[in-house]
Amino acid sequence: MSTLKILVVDDEPGIRSGITRILRNFKVDYPFMDEAFEFEVTEASSGEAGIELIESNQPDILLLDNKLPGIQGVEVLEYIKKKQKSIIVVMITSYASLELAVKATSDGAYDFIPKPFTPQELKSSIENITKRVFLKKMTNKLQDTGKQIRFTFLSVLSHELKAPLNSIEGYLKMIRERQNGPKLDDYDVMIDRSLERIKGMRHLILDLLDLTRVESGKAKRNITEVDLVSVARTAMDTMRPYAIQRDVKLSLHHQGSTVIQGDAEEIEIIFNNLISNAIKYNRDGGSVDFTLETQEDCMQIRVVDTGIGMNNDELGKIFDDFVRIKNDKTKNISGSGLGLSIVKKLIENYGGKIEVTSIPDQGSTFNVRLPIEKPCS
């Protein structure tokens, strides 16, 4: 749990105490954050007292009224700008005007909360600010990882997102200009293609979040007894609509105990990717067989598909980041090129192994060995 310091500068005791009460037990937590944020609130009744607290115990967030006894809120804002303090400032005032908004924004104010405000309005603003603080911290961390790594990462990301965004923009312009006529049905294909590209972008973003989680080494892991059959069934149920579309039959086989020590979410990521790929690169009317069996101190997991297969050159690349097999058979198959890279990293974190064999036009077999309690021999 991280704590953000909030300073409230307002001459109305009711406003100060109300903000403190609203934020006392408030927490902000999103799936993309590695920890939740709570808030420590201090109060000042004047601009002068606020500046003293800024100097003695610099806050992360300043909730600042403009109409104050003595110096005004915009003067406090000017002071923060002059001193180059890294503080996110939100103006809280019932005297908001265009002139004040322009000046406060030019001096660095992030947002406005008009009086009177509801608890939800305050919480919503704090949530947005917290996301900004978190992203700024992540940006600072990225600055320490090396320019070349960032350049490669951002180049790939921009390339992967640019094409679908351009396509969606083109379709929307065609729809707006009614290029296919006035009937809504005439635009169904454009809408379907746009939705498909949005789905691809969402998958890319989710894969990037998974990759970041794995490579950071700081994600919280919930290691418990995990029944792999239960996780496999959940993964199959998740992918079944896609399998039905492709007329691909999914089968699960298991024998003996299938319980290991692990993180259920990580295991599900592994299974989801393996099953999704087995369906995606399959042929219509094909099959995917998922087998679990205990072999000494390890759990053997085998995923066999009847898909397009791979040649030896392709096999040597599939576990690399951002690698997608490109040929005539895969040109209409979308993906981030991260799924198998994430799978391999997660498996190796367990001291496990993954291998693949494949025959072009016949299918592929992925063999995974996960330790039941200790690394596989």
Image (cartoon, rainbow, N blue to C red):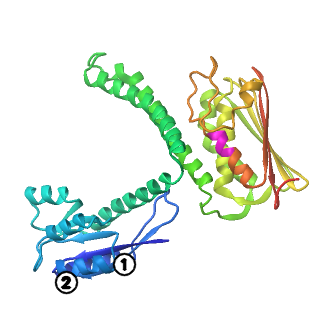
Coordinates of residue 196 in the picture (x, y in percent): 47, 31
> Residue 22: which quarter of the image?
bottom left
Looking at the image, which residue is at 35% across and 69% down?
60
Earlier residue among tags 2 and 1: 2
Looking at the image, which residue is at 16% across and 81% down?
12
Report the span colored magenta: 339-343
Q: Residue furthest right?
A: 296
Viewer-proximal residue among 319 and 272: 319
Where is mark 2, residue-wise?
13
Q: Is residue 180 above or below residue 273?
A: above
Task: Say left or right for 145 vs 41.
Answer: right
Dot 2 alpha-carbon crowd within 10 angstroms: few under 14, some 14 to 19, many 20 or more: few
* Residue 330 appears in view: yes
Coordinates of residue 115 in the picture (x, y in percent): 16, 69
Dot 1 alpha-carbon crowd within 10 angstroms: few under 14, some 14 to 19, many 20 or more: few
Where is mark 1, residue-wise?
24
Type of the residue with mark 2: Pro
> Residue 122: which quarter of the image?
bottom left
Marking on residue 306: none
* Residue 20 appears in view: no
